Amino acid sequence: MPNNVVVLGTQWGDEGKGKIADLLTSKAGIVVRSQGGNNAGHTLVVGDRKVVVRLVPSGILHPNCLCLIGSGVVVSPEALFGEIEELRAAGFSDVENRIKLSAACALLLPIHPAIDRGAEKLRGNNAIGTTGRGIGPCYEDKVARRGLRVGDLRDLSIFEDKLKALLDYRNFLLKNYYHEKEVTFEEVMNSVMTVRERMLNMVTDVSAQIANAHKEGVKVLFEGAQGTFLDIDYGTYPYVTSSNTVAGGCCTGSGAGPLAIDYVLGIAKVYTTRVGGGPFPTELTDEIGKGICTRGKEFGAVTGRPRRAGWYDAVAMRRAVTINSLSALALMKLDVLDGMDEVKICTAYKMKDGTISQLPPLAAYEYDVEPIYETMPGWSESTFGVTSFDKLPVNAQNYLKRLEELSGVKVALISTGPEREQTIFLEDPFA
Ligand code: GDP
Ligand code: IMO
Ligand code: MG
C-alpha cells in the first residue's frame, strides 16, 4: 500500500495540483513542499470558499495535517506570514502551529524581487515573464553559496554579516547594471526581524519527520509546484523556473530518499495552458483558445495574468511520464471542453529532420516544430460535477480513453469541477 505519494504538474503549471493535493490530504498526515516558492498559486475550493495557497502546502485546510516546507523551497518571510494572516482571516486560526520548515531553506529577501524586475526589464522582448517574486535571483544566491538561510536567523551577528556581503554584491548590480533603486540593509532587516522568533519556532528536521512518519505508518503527500516543462533542466530553457519541478526534486528538496517514494501522480489538464513567455507547440491563438480560457477561467492565481491555452500535447506528456516515473495521471477540467464540436490531441511533432513522438530536450530556440493532430468528436452534454465514468457522455469517455492510450500511463482520477466532490476516482493513489 503506497505510503508516500507525489503529486506534481506534468505541463507548464496550474494543472490543478492544489485541488488534488487538498483532496488526497484526507488520507495523509503530512503534506510536504520541496521546491519553488511563492511563485506557486494553488487553488483550493471547499463549498463556496476559495483559498489560494502559495508557500503553504495545500494540506493546510485539514485540521490534523502537518505541513512541511523542505530545504528546496525558497522562503520569503513576508510572503509566508502574509499568507498565514490571510488564512487566519479566512477562519483557519491554528495554521501557524501546523507549518514547519527546514533551517536549510533559502531566505527570499526584498533584494530578490528587485533583481527579478531589473533582469526582466533588461531582457526586453525576450523577457521570461516571471512572476516577479524574486525566485530566480534567490536560487542564484543559494547556488552561488552567498545566500542566507532560515537557520542563519539564529545568530544575528552572523546574519547581519552575511546580509551586508549579499547586499554589497546585489546592490552593485542593481545600481550599475540594472539601473534600479538599491535595497537598504534596514529595509531587509525590518522585513525579517518582525517575524524572526516566529519563524525560528517553526524550524524542524523535515527529513527526519518524513522518515519517522514512514516508521509510524503515517502517509505523506509531496506536493509539487510549477510543472514538468518549467523545470530548470527539462523545461523549455530559458523560459523556465529556477528549480527542479520533476519528481526527483521532491527527494532533494525534502530530504526523503528516492526509495521513499511509492507512487507518482501526474496532474494534467485535458488541454494545455501556459502563463508567461516561451514555446508552446499546441497553442491556440484563435477563438477556440479564447473560449477555453474563458470557460476554464484561465487567469494566473498569483499574478492574475491571462494564461495561454492549447490542445493536449501527448508528445510532451510521454516525456513527462518518463522523467517523473509517473504511476498514473489525474486528468483535470474535463468540463471546460463541454460543448465543443471537436477536440484535438497532438500525437507527434513534425521537425526539420523528421517526425518525432516523444519530446526531446530542446532549448527554446530549437522549437521549430509543427504539431500533428488527431481529431475526435466533441460532446454537447455537461460533464460538470459528474462523479462516475459511466455517467460521462460517450464521446468524453472516448476522448479520455484516447488520452490515456496516447500518454502511455493509466488514469487514476478525472476532475469535473473545482470542488473536492467533483471528481471521478478510478484508482486511489494511497490504497
Ligand atoms: P495549481 O497551480 O496546479 O494548483 O492550479 P491553479 O489553482 O493555479 O489553477 C487551477 C484552476 O482550475 C483553479 O482555479 C481550480 O479551482 C480550477 N479547477 C481545478 N480542477 C477543475 C475542474 O475539474 N474543472 C474546473 N472548471 N476548474 C477546475
Ligand atoms: P503553480 O505551482 C504556472 C512560470 C512563470 C514564468 C516562469 C518563471 O501555481 O503551477 P518564476 O517566477 O518562477 O521565475 O517564473 O515560470 N511559473 C508558473 N506558471 N504556474 C506556476 O506555479 C508557476 N510558477 C512559475 O509564469 O513563465
Ligand atoms: Mg497555480
Image (cartoon, grey):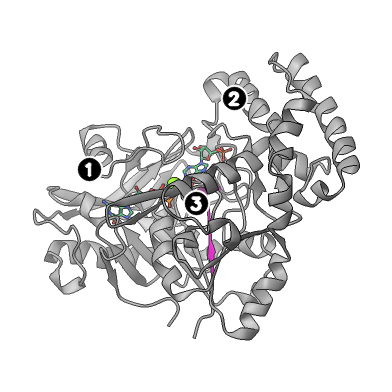
Give the residues in magenta: 221-230
CA–CA distance between discs 2 and 1?
A: 31 Å
Examine the rendered structure and indicate whether residue 303 appears above or below residue 412. above
| Residue 119 falls left or right of residue 422 | right
Instruction: Point out the tag, 3 or 1, that comes first from the N-terminus.
Output: 3
Q: Residue type at mark 2?
A: Glu
Depth check, front residue: 26 or 221: 26
Taking the spot 66% from the left edge, 47% from the top edge, the residue there is 74
Q: Secondary structure at mark 2?
A: helix
Classify mark 2 as within 8 Å of ligand 2 or not, answering yes or no. no
Residue 362 appears at what percent x and percent y?
55, 45
The dot on residue 312 is none
The dot on residue 120 is 2
Residue 48 lies in the magenta-colored region: no
Residue 124 appears at what percent x and percent y?
56, 19
Q: Check disc 1 and report the residue beneath it.
A: 295
The dot on residue 227 is 3
| Label 3: few (<14), some (14–19) or many (≥20) C-alpha neighbours in 10 Å | many
| Residue 373 falls left or right of residue 148 | left
Q: Residue type at mark 3?
A: Gly
Examine the rendered structure and indicate whether residue 398 appears above or below residue 53. below
